[in-house]
Amino acid sequence: MEGRVSSVGGDDSDDDPIMPPRPPPPPPPPPSSSVQAHCSETYVIQIPKNQIYRIPPPENAIIAERHRTPDKSNKNKVCCSSLWIIGVILVAAVLIGLALVVFYFMFSPKVPIFSIAHVLAKNNTHSSPHKHSGPRYEISMDVKNPNQFMAINYKHGGVAALSFKGKKIAKGEFPTWYQGENSAKRIKLFLQGVNAAVPYEIGKTMNGKKPKVLVSLALDVKVPVKVKFGVIKKWSMDTNVACKLKVSTLGVGSRILSQECHTEFKF
């Protein structure tokens, strides 16, 4: 008897084939930015009221910027104004200087002309308060003002001194007086001797004796004056006069034999 033996489990490879293992699923895609923004969290921060800082409006920022960087046009205007003022001052100074130069050359002050007309020495009387001092000298002077438009006012404080051989023998005050334009006048100086001892040559000529040698004297005058051009006061100054002269005698009949006077203004 022919029998068929079947194997347990038989060969069913044709019916159930063996499958390979499946790969793992891919990871999910990352969420988009919109999803992240939507999922972002919101935080609320509380600040104390006394620490709240206010933001200034934009107008304040513009003003601060202008102060920090000033407008160039305004700066240029200020510079132009300053230059204009300086220019005006310089032009005015030049014009004033030219006017003064013209004024000086048109009305330049000329010094007065002094000359000695007479010199006389007298002994003091017993009743004179200067009886114990030297003799008294009387000097006549001619003064001429050569200025056409300038008057001279000789003020208080002028002094005069008479010297013999370099030593002062008499002194006194210069008179105060007013001299008009282009005028001449004779004035007198009264000088008092400074020493009781009279030089021998001076005493000899006072007695009327003519010395063998002429007496040489020097007269120095310093007087403050104020010069005026019409009604305009100009300035004050000092007038210095230095005269050298030779006389025949200092007594009666005295004559000026030679003289040389020099005058200058001291500003």
Image (tube, rainbow, N blue to C red):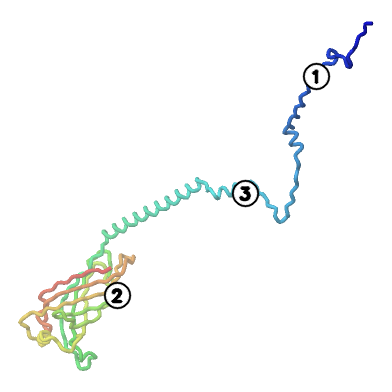
Tell me the distance, in whole angstroms, between the alpha carbons under discs 3 and 1. 80 Å
Q: Nearer the viewer, mark 3 or mark 1?
A: 1
For image coordinates 73% across by 55% down, the residue present is 49
Q: Tags 2 and 3 in contact by the CB under 8 Å rule?
A: no
The residue located at (26%, 74%) in the rendering is: 223
Above or below residue 109? Residue 63 is above
Is residue 192 or residue 184 the one in the foreground?
192
Badge 1 amino acid:
Met
Residue beneath disc 1: 19
- Depth check, mark 2 against mark 1: the one in front is 1
| Camera-nearest label, 2 or 3 | 3
Question: Is disc 2 surrounded by few (<14), some (14 to 19) or many (20+) residues within 10 Å?
Answer: some
Please, what secondary structure does the residue beneath circle 3 have? helix
In terms of sequence position, does the residue under pointer 2 or pointer 3 come before the other? 3
Asked whether disc 2 touches disc 1, contact meaning CB atoms under 8 Å apart, the reply is no
Indicate whether 42 appears above or below 23: below
Whole-number angstrom distance, CA of label 2 to CA of label 1: 149 Å
Q: Is residue 2 left or right of residue 249?
A: right
> Which quarter of the picture shows residue 231?
bottom left
Residue tagged 2: 155
Tag 1 secondary structure:
loop
Q: Which of the numbered marks, if any, corresponds to residue 60?
A: 3
Of 147 and 67, which appears nearest the observer?
A: 67
Residue 126 placement, left or right of 91: left
